[in-house]
Image (spheres, grey):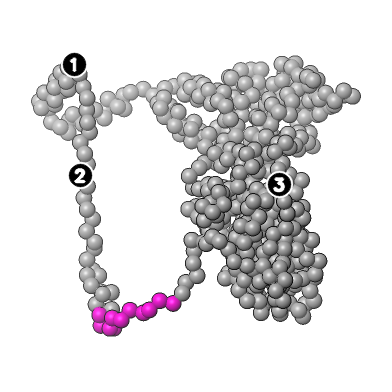
Amino acid sequence: MSANIVIGQAPQGQPIEIDIKELLATRLLVQGNSGSGKSHLLRRILEESAGIVQQVVIDPEGDFVSLAEEFGHVVIDGSAYGEAEIARLGARIRQHRASVILALDELEIDQQMKCAAQFLNALFDAPREQWYPALVVVDEAQMFAPAAAGEVSEEARRVSLAAMTNLMCRGRKRGLAGVIATQRLAKLAKNVAAEASNFLMGRTFLDIDMIRAADLLGMERRQAETIRDLARGQFLGLGPAISRRPVPVNVGTVRTGAKSVTPGLAPLPTATTEELRELLHENLHVEPERPEFPRPAPRVTMGVDDADTLASRIAASEMIDPGVALSRERAQERERAEPAPEESRAAMVEIMNAMAQEDDCTFQSSTTLFQDFTIRCRMKGISVRGLDATMFRRGFAAALAGIRDPDEERWTDLLNLAKHVPDDALATFYVIARAAMDGKPCPDDVDLARVYGTSSPRRVQRLLDYLEKDGLIVVRTDFSGKRSVGLPDLGVTTAPQEA
């Protein structure tokens, strides 16, 4: 099977091809102002390579969903899933090698960035045996890897930029070939753009973008003006997968279309000025009527005893003033004693311990877990007014490590030491510390990865390196490769890791 696809023609008529095998190893950057034909070019590449390689499309505008009907891509609506579900979908995509389109058009920009980051991280963290080759196409890449902070939150920018950097810098060894498109190179983070070895540059007008595009194409500064003269659908291509010298490309036709269309001219209304004035001002001062929807009466099903009780209450209420009855009812509610603080704390710990026993709980976001926790507390009549998300994360980390009662005296020194540990590393630290205090073998990377909420053992290694550099642990590995971890501040060490 040929791995070359035709994306268009040169001005002289000869076909211009892209070598997909080379593209998987060298990545591609597409640049052009709005209306230059970037999305059309991406669609041409996707259509021509659909039968050759797995494709994953990050689609912020929902323009590429039409590929599903013609080529069998699976459309994933990003607004319909939570963080944990998006992560699981990303993992299954690598496992089953499905070509998918992640449509983000129903989300705000902050949510788009977080959803795309969660999705890309799941692709990146796949186990080694699932590192199949795949094109990862990201349209409007300047949104997901901005060069500077904008109106989005710092958290969204940080996680999205980190995911895009991983895709372009480290994705090749995992089979992920980034194909990113941007309106302006100046808006795209330099460390993301710099990793591409193939370029398709479309029309642009700003001097800074023309100069950067010319530099990437190996053109002299005085030749940068030619980029301004490109017509819609014309690009200059360069790279090991395209051509060793800059070559002009007229992008070919496509079989599918985008849901967005270029606005055209439409006939103006034929009404006179006075008629338009009357239409605009008619009943301007009158508010539109709002239909009133009657509230349906609740359906109550009761037995004979319930009916008798209700009848007695109605009869009793007829003998007193309604206001007095209401005051009495409120007084009775106030008299209901709330659980003592000790009882509430014990109940919260019990709920955290139950949540920690559930499968895949560590792969859910802390926000989702905290919401679940508060709902469970309310269902049991427990007030959570004095507990914030940070306190919950640290308490839940103890529950994951099997510390059932943090108030026990044996955990006092450990909890004091843990104040210096970041929230995201706390559960892993607790697991290691408890194994050391109990004299048990050091947990292996798989167990630590599960507690850390990842499927990548390398992330666990980086975490251990961080804790060791911070002076919290000391890692020793014997000649047989068995690892043991000591906690100098507690004076305890785990047994060597079991084979």
Image coordinates of residue 51 in percent, x first then y, are 64, 51
Res 29 quadrant in image: bottom right
Res 404 quadrant in image: top right
Q: Which label sits on residue 305?
A: 1
- Up/down of 38 relative to 320, above or below: below
Image coordinates of residue 420 in percent, x first then y, are 69, 34
Upstream in sequence: badge 3 or badge 2: 3
Q: CA distance from mark 2 to mark 1?
A: 31 Å
Other residues around mark 1 within 10 Å, as few (<14) / some (14–19) / many (≥20):
few
Question: Which amino acid does the dot numbered 2 rest on?
Answer: Pro
Front residue of this view, candidates 46 and 353: 46
Q: Identify the residue at horizontal 72%, vertical 58% (top origin).
A: 4
Image coordinates of residue 234 in percent, x first then y, are 65, 72
Could you say whether the residue bearing mark 3 is in a helix, strand or loop?
loop
Extent of the magenta region: 265-275
Answer with left or right where residue 60 lies relative to residue 309: right
Image coordinates of residue 344 in percent, x first then y, are 47, 23
Tag count: 3
State whether residue 365 appears in this view.
no
Other residues around mark 3 within 10 Å, as few (<14) / some (14–19) / many (≥20):
many
Upstream in sequence: badge 2 or badge 1: 2
Could you say whether the residue bearing mark 1 is in a helix, strand or loop?
helix
Q: CA distance from mark 3 to mark 1?
A: 69 Å
Q: Which label sits on residue 133?
A: 3
Question: Which amino acid does the dot numbered 3 rest on?
Answer: Pro
Res 393 quadrant in image: top right
Residue 116 highlighted magenta (yes or no): no
Q: Determine which residue is flagged by label 2.
A: 294
Q: Identify the residue at horizontal 61%, vertical 26% (top origin).
A: 400
Q: Identify the residue at horizontal 71%, vertical 79% (top origin).
A: 226
Other residues around mark 2 within 10 Å, as few (<14) / some (14–19) / many (≥20):
few
Q: Which label sits on residue 230?
A: none
